[in-house]
Image (cartoon, grey):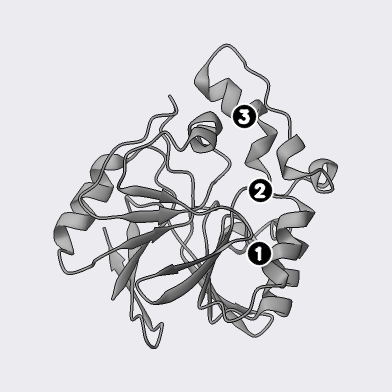
Amino acid sequence: MFGVLGDIHGDFDSVRRIIEHQPDVPFWLCVGDVADDNGRYEAFERPIYWIKGNNENFDAIARRDFPSSLHFLDNGQLAVIGGLRVAGLGGTFAPTWFDTASRDLPHPVKGTPRATALADKRRHFVREEVEQIKALGGIDVLLTHEAARPYRIRGKGPDAGKTPINEVLAEAQPRLHLFGHHHELTDQVRQGVRSIGLDLVSRSYLLADESTLAVDVVKS
């Protein structure tokens, strides 16, 4: 068994309560937005493997400057976690920056940690990372921050999903796709792949079977 957390946004107390309530879960996956508004990260009693959201301390990520219980997953890479083959595509989609090399994404410094994070273009994923994931084989779990199309928040409004996520699902065909960003629990099929959106950690989380990837929703 393993657990899955949605966006944390600095709600470290909720994460600790979840981990305490599930002592038999050896590790957790997280779909991003872990840091609080001051760019801080805190330690937990179980390892958490996470991708970037669009609200992070990207300098800390670059330096790997966070507690040892937090394990950051780089975009486009494959990690074996507890026997699972996990790949991630963290961050948000911005057409203006999509064809930029990830190393060249600008990151200006602003007056506050929150303003700096919002101006930091490292919060986006880029084409080279999408192509890296497409080339991977045998992915069990794909973590993204963005949703695949179509995705309408609370079932209303314009499509908030992003085409590159659909392209990755179609090409890589992971066994399970998990995403966050929209703070809503959803369960859909996109490109033949089960695609589950996570709610905030204060409201719910998932428990999953490592072999079958069957998923249960648990209220926080």
Q: Could you tell whether 194 is left or right of 171 in the image?
A: left
Element under label 3? helix
Q: Position of residue 107 (x, y in %)?
A: 67, 27
Q: Which residue is disc 2 drawn over?
A: 92
The residue positioned 62% from the left and 15% from the top of the image is 110
Q: Could you tell whether 164 is left or right of 202 in the image?
A: right
Alpha-carbon span between mark 3 and mark 1: 23 Å
Can residue 47 be seen from the camera position used here?
yes
Considering depth in this image, is 54 or 142 the residue closer to the camera?
142
The residue positioned 31% from the left and 44% from the top of the image is 68
Q: Which residue is disc 1 drawn over?
A: 151
Element under label 2? loop
Q: Position of residue 108 (x, y in %)?
A: 68, 21
Q: Is residue 201 above or below residue 196?
A: above
Marks 2/1 in contact by CB < 8 Å: the verdict is: no
Marks 3/2 in contact by CB < 8 Å: the verdict is: no
Disc 1 residue crowd, few under 14, some 14–19, many 20+, Cα 10 Å: many
Closer to the camera: disc 3 or disc 1? 3
Q: Which residue is disc 3 drawn over?
A: 118
Disc 2 residue crowd, few under 14, some 14–19, many 20+, Cα 10 Å: many
Alpha-carbon span between mark 3 and mark 2: 12 Å
Mark 3 or mark 1, which has the lower sequence index?
A: 3
